[in-house]
Amino acid sequence: MLHRIDFSHERYLKIEDLVRRIKGYYPEADFTMLRKAYAFAKRAHDGQKRSSGEEFIIHPMNVAATIIKLHLDMDSIVAALLHDTVEDCDVAPEEIEKEFNLDVARIVVGLTKISKIKFKTKEESQIENFRKMVVAMAKDIRVIIVKLADRMHNMRTLQYISQDRQMKIAQETLDIYVSLASRLGINSVKSDLEDLCLRFLKPEIYYRLAEKIAMKKNDRDKYIKEVVDIVKDKLLEYSLKAEVKGRSKHFYSIYKKMFARGVDFDQIQDILAFRIIVNNITECYKALGIIHSSFTPIPGRFKDYIAIPKPNNYQSLHTTVIGPAAARIEIQIRNYEMNEVAETGIAAHWKYKDGMANRNTKLAWIQELVEFNQNMDNRELMDAVKNDLEIEGVFVFTPKGEVVELRYGSTPLDFAYSVHTEVGHTCVGAKVNGKMVPLKYRLKSGDSVDILTSRSQTPSKDWLNIVKSSRAKTKIKQWLLKVERDHNKEVGKEILDKALRIFSTSAKTLKKNNEWDLVMSRCTASNDEEVYINIGMGKVSTQSIIATIPSLQKVGTEDANTTKKIDEIDKYSQKISQTARKKSSKDNAIIVDGISDLMVRMARCCNPIPGDSIVGYITRGRGITVHTSSCQRVDSCEAGRNIVVTWNSDFNFKHPVNIRVITHDRPGMLSKISNKIDSQSVNIRSAIAKSLPDRKGSFIFEIEVKDYSELIGVINGLESVKDVISVSRV
Ligand code: MN
C-alpha cells in the first residue's frame, strides 16, 4: 500500500468487482450475504437517481468499494450497501436485522441518526460538541468509518448540487469529518477529504495548485526518479533492501504550508515527499543513519514518531534533507505495519483478520485496542480513542440548533437549568422532538429540546430527585433555601412582634432603649433578619428572649397571665412552622412529574379517583386535565399533549364519582340504597331516580369516596341489597 489509496468515483462498478476485491484479502467471506445486500439495496433504491443523473445504487456501491479498500469486515461492507435504505426508502431497521444481522442493522441505524444531525458550525466550541455528538451517536466505530466513506463519495459528486450547498457541505466536512478521520488516524481518508474540501471551499487556490503541480510534472517526475535511485543505491551499500517512493504532497498540506508561512506556491520548496519502507524498527533507524550521512539534514526537522507516536497511533521517522540540486526533500521512514496504520488508522486494527469475524465487535474492538496499546506502551492513543468512544455525556439541540453537552441521564430540567437559572425555575414542561415529555424524561443524544416556562412556576423539592447535574441541584437548593428563609423571617417577625405587644413594647422601643442588642446576642444574630429567621425556625423561643430583657422582667413576674400567653405564642409558632413544611405536599391530589402548584382538574367525563390508572392531558390555557387511562376521550386527545401524572398519597380528599344502580321496581328502593351507602360512611352528593320499561328502576348517585377501594366497598355492599340487579361506575 505504498501508493495513496485511489478513492475515485467508479461509474461502472459491478457487484462482481466487489466480490473479486474482497476475495483478495478475505477469501472465506460470506458472499451470499454480500449479494443479498446488493439485491436488497438495488430493489430499495429502484427508480431513485443521484443529482448527477446516475442510478442511485452507484452511490452505496462506491461507499462499499471504499470500505473494501480499507479492508474492513463484511458487516461494514453490507452496512455500506444498505446505508441509505432506512433514511431514503423507509426500510425498517427490524427488516435489516431479520434479513442480515443485528450488527448490520445497528450500523445502518447509527448512520441514519448521524445523517439527521443539523450542523451549525460557526464557533470552535460548537464544532467540538458536534464532533462529540457524532461519536456519541455512532457508538460503534464502524459507523464513523462508513460515514466517512459516504461523505467521501458525496464530496466527489458535489459539483451536481447548488453552490450554496456545496460550500455548506464542504465546510461541515472540513470541520467535523476531516477532524474525525484525523483522530482515528485514517490519513488516506483525511488527506482525500481535505483536498476535496479545498476544491470547493477555495477553488481558486485548488486549481492554481493543480495547475502549478501539473506544469513541471515531467521535470519533477525525472527528479523523483533520480532521488529514488540514489536513495536505493545508498541503502543497498549497507545491504538494506527497501521500497522507496516519491510524490507530491497533497494539495491541502501545501496550502496549509503556504498559509502558515504567508508565502506563495513558488516559495514553497518542499512539496515532494519521499517514503522509505523497510521490514522492522531497527532497519528504520539504520535507514535514517544512512540518509543523514548521505545528505545534509536540515536542523530541527527530524521527528521521531516511532519512539513517541502521535495520539492517533501514527508512527514514522520524519526528516528533511538537502537533496540533489539543492532542493529540500522530506523523507518518511517506517516499516510496513506502520505504513498500514498511517494509511488506514483505526481501520487497520479493525480490518478483517483470521477469526475476526466471530468476535463481538464493538467491545472486543476496544479491548483489542487496549491490549494493542499496552504492548506498544502507548497510553496516549488509548486515552484519545477511549475519550472519543466512551463519551459519557448526551448531546442535545437547543431550538436554535446549538449543541449542548449534558451529563448522562440528564432530563429536560437539567437542560432548562443549563440554559439559564430563571428558565429552570419557571420550567413547567418540555417538548422533545416536538412532543410533550415528562420532566423526568431521559434525554438522548440528538434530541431537540424546547422548554416550556410559566411565570407562576416555582421549583419544588421533588425536582432534586429529577435533575442529574450538580448545577441544577445547587440552583434548586438555593431557591428552596431562600424561600424557607423568607418564610421563616416572616413567621419569626410575626411571632416576636406579637410577644412584644403583650408586654406593651416593640422592636422599635427596644432599639431606642439599647436593649435590642440583647435580643440579637440571645439569637446569635448579627442583624434583624437573622433574629427573625432564628425565631421563625424555632431555634430560639420568645420566652427566652423576653427573659434576657431586664425592663420586661418586672412586668413578666407580676402577671402570671403573661407567661401563659407567651407559652401560647411559642406553641403557635411551632404549629406555624410545621404546617408550613407540610403544606406543599398536601396541596394537590395529583403529582405532575414533581411539579406542584400546577392547575389540575379531574375530567368530568370519567371522574378519576385515587387508585385508578390515570393520564394527564395538557389543555390550552386551562392547566392539566386528569382522565382515567381507559377514558375514551383520551384517545381523541391531540397527540403529544399527554403527560405522566400520579396520585399524591399525602393528599386527603374526597373524590366525586357516579354510580348507576339498576333495581327491580319496588317501593322504598331509593331509601334502601341510600341507607346502605350511608352505613359505609360515604357521603351522597346527589341522586337521580328514573323508571325504566319492563318494571325496572335506575338510580344514578354521585358519591364521594377516598379512593378506588372505598368505591369497590360501596359497589359490593349495594350488590348485596335485595332487588338490586346491577351496580356500575359511570
Ligand atoms: Mn449516502
Image (cartoon, grey):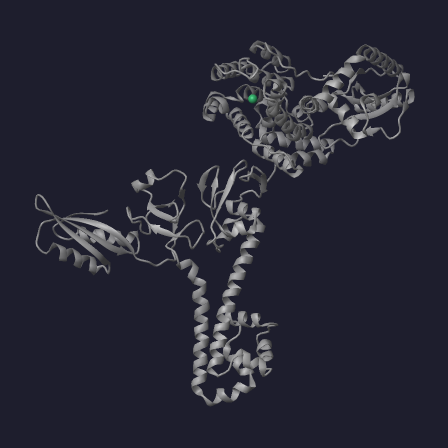
Position of 55 with respect to 25 (left or right) is left
Image quadrant assignment for residue 185: top right
Q: Residue at x 41, y 45 (%)?
A: 644
The answer to whether 268 appears left or right of 126 in the picture is: right
Residue 394: percent from left, percent from top? 56, 39
Residue 123 in sight? yes
Q: Nearer the viewer, residue 360 or 448?
A: 448
Q: Is residue 270 left or right of residue 84?
A: right
Quadrant for ligand 1?
top right
66 in relation to 512, above or below: above
x, y percent for residue 359: 58, 26
Q: Is residue 345 left or right of residue 500?
A: right
Residue located at (51% from left, 40% from top): 449
The spot of residue 144 in percent (x, y) is 60, 27
Task: Give residue 244's position: percent from left, percent from top.
Answer: 80, 15
- Camera-side residue: 702 or 578? 702
